[in-house]
Image (cartoon, rainbow, N blue to C red):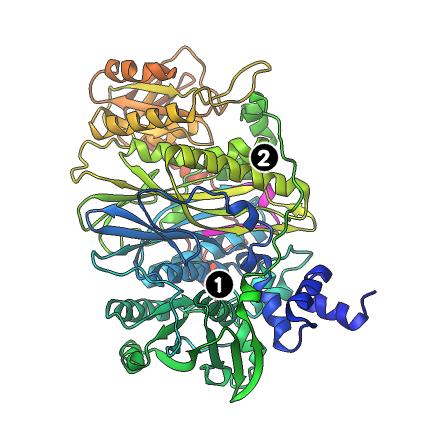
Amino acid sequence: MIDLNLEEQLKKFRLSKSEYELITDLLGRGPDGLEWAVFSALWSEHCSYKSSKIHLKKLYNKSRHVLQSMGENAGVVDLGEGEKVAFKMESHNHPSFIEPFQGAATGVGGILRDIFTMGARPVALANYLAFGDPSSAFMKRLLDGVVGGISGYGNCVGVPMLTGQTLFDTGYDENILVNALAVGLFCADDPIMSARGAKPGCVIVYLGARTGRDGIHGASMASESFEGSSQKKLPTIQIGDPFFEKLLIEATLEMIREGIVVSMQDMGAAGLTSSTFEMASSSGFGFEMDLGLVPLRDSSMTPEEILLSESQERMLLVCEPENTLRIQEIAKKWDLEASEIGKVVTGTKLLLKWHGEAVLEIDPHIVVERAPMYERPFVSEIPKILAKKFEWNAAEIEQVSPSVRAARESDKSWIYRQYDQRVGGSTEQDCSSTVGVLKLPSKRSLAVSLGGRPNWVLAHAFTGGMDAVLEPTLKMSLQGFEVVGLTDCLNFGNPERETVMTQFVHSLDGMNEVCRSLDIPIISGNVSFYNETKLKSIPPTPATGLVGVRRIVDASNIPSDRFVHPQKEAWLLTLPFRELFGQEVFDLGMSLSQLGEAINLLRDMSLGGEFETARVVGSSGLETTLESMIGSEVGFEWTSETELTRKYVAYQIVFTFKGEADIFSKAIKPFGVQIDKIGRTTRGIYKVRGQYLNCRQVLEVRSRKFPLFSEEYDLGAAVFGGSEKAIGNQNV
């Protein structure tokens, strides 16, 4: 029998009875004082990964390129020629649903800190977003706020938005997704920084913004489903300052390059609690800190509030005592505070003081490493799905609301034009292309491509997981890139429900199988559970971010993803990984090793200049893809006897060739693919189903499909710093 006072404590700190019993076993007594807050934060799903850790251990995360994999703030891969990059993807779903502008903005700030904490300068951003029906005023507010938050923070901090993906589905009506990805570049001699390495005698330094009450219990909030109104959770939302972040980037990188930092951790989820406990646990030594020395925005804050605050733009550093003064000098140069708040000592205990008086003494290892690890129930075998489940034909499209269908098929330029895509001067291909591309100092190119289609995972989780890797890999290969690593954001509902856990496990297995076969290491990522409201879960959404390198300097032979010249024959390639009719199942049709060879062939022929145009058919189907490939001067005419339908078939690629198609047809034939001539490019005319349309008219119609505007709704309304202000209408 559990007493009422204990029951109230467990509810307040979001701990289960079994977790309380485990804590009691570890401590030899019940938790007391600040221990409740510490266990609550660090044993939350968001921090401990207690429902997913057992499955994440099986991920393929090593290859010849990998310098740092999971376990640090971000993964790092070697690109050769003295260049290496760090990258990671993170979710900020719950905060963005509660307060879209600040939730999305601080999501960008947080992922940037993960990158420069490693010692890499942030050079690119990407985002994966999912919204519900955009015809409602509520969803319009969320959509506008999220886009405004991302652009407001990213543009101010000076990092280009290289690519993005935006989904619309009624499954996200109650829970939206905001996943942010960042890439950072190391100079040739730059060290890779670590959160590990603290040793006795070192000093603990607090760097950055002062601590306030924003974001308290944010990690625990992100580990729960929504049960009703989200407004009561507003105090758990962090508030960001991108200009302060820019100063923090410069100061941090200067300190790292001077070699005066031993280890470093940003204060993300659970704030000072997570950074302190994780650094102490990984070092194997004791930490002594006085919370009374932490710079505060409000001097009335309690030790618990200081520990759990998720105020933004803060770092925890460990340095040798002789370097403390230099760290403070660099901080002052950049108008930042650097305060000595503790030291590393012998032993293994973490001692927290409040103005000299001990308020907590505990072994950090039992908090960080002994968190519960659950084996949630899931169905171990799922049948192969019938191919017809993957059809997206006209009948099914009609079941989707007109506003959702229009949003899916519309031109998304009104979104990405709000992002600064060219700041820094290194962007080669921006959000208007299927793959974002950045020029490296070596004159080679770096690419980022996103994947993850929830309707696939709903139909068959394993296949959907495979697709989350295969589709962006195909896009990269057509641009001549070799994929060197993958990061992910695994967005699912309540893991305590067997259906959700089954989707999670099998989609992860599908991703892992493709990555292992194609030698694509999964080097970083994030799991976001409890994306549901009143038991309604989001569609299972494993979002992926792939990073690749094109090892040539001259990219003049690389194909465009749009039609370039008129009077060119257009061809459609259909890989064996496609719809099979009758009672046959949806299957790959070739081994993964064969698929790898086919992908290599596509990359080699792309680099060799065989293709003038090459584009993977998107989820909205062939017709929408063809519309997106035309320009104001170059159109397309469908000449195939096969009727152009809305049905989606995976995987298809549209080509035009610089020469004859025969060379490619012969090279690809051993893989059992189907290649058909479907039409030709034209001068300014788009002709399908017997109708002649001016290309300019088609482009105008596509741009107007998005159901965003009404007389009552101002697209520019956004919330920043708690006050509403208009930022101006966007042309769509």
Give the amino acid type for the residue marked by disc 2 in the picture: Leu
Name the secondary structure under disc 2: helix
Quadrant where the image shows the C terminus = top left
**Seen from this angle, which residue lies furthest bottom?**
356
Closest to the observer: 423 or 27? Answer: 27
Q: Position of residue 671 (x, y in %)?
A: 36, 17
Residues rendered magenta in the picture: 168-179
Q: Position of residue 574 (x, y in %)?
A: 40, 20
Name the secondary structure under disc 1: helix
Is 109 magenta? The answer is no
Location of residue 35 with respect to 155 vertically, above or below: below
Asked if residue 256 shows in the view, the reply is: yes
Give the amino acid type for the residue marked by disc 1 in the picture: Gln
Residue 436, picture quadrant: top left
Measuring 53% from the left and 22% from the top, which residue is drawn there? 586
Residue 608, picture quadrant: top left
**Seen from this angle, which residue lies furthest left?**
554
Question: Looking at the rendered structure, which numbered label has been put on residue 686?
Answer: none
Quadrant where the image shows the N terminus = bottom right
N-terminal of the two: label 2 or label 1?
A: 1
Location of residue 194 with respect to 443 vertically, above or below: below
| Mark 2 crowd level (few <14, some 14–19, many ≥20, 10 Å Cα) | some
- Judge left or right: residue 567 versus residue 537: left
The residue identified by callout 1 is: 102
Q: CA distance from mark 2 to mark 1?
A: 31 Å
Is 175 magenta? The answer is yes
The residue identified by callout 2 is: 458
**Seen from this angle, which residue lies furthest right?**
1
Closest to the observer: 553 or 172? Answer: 553
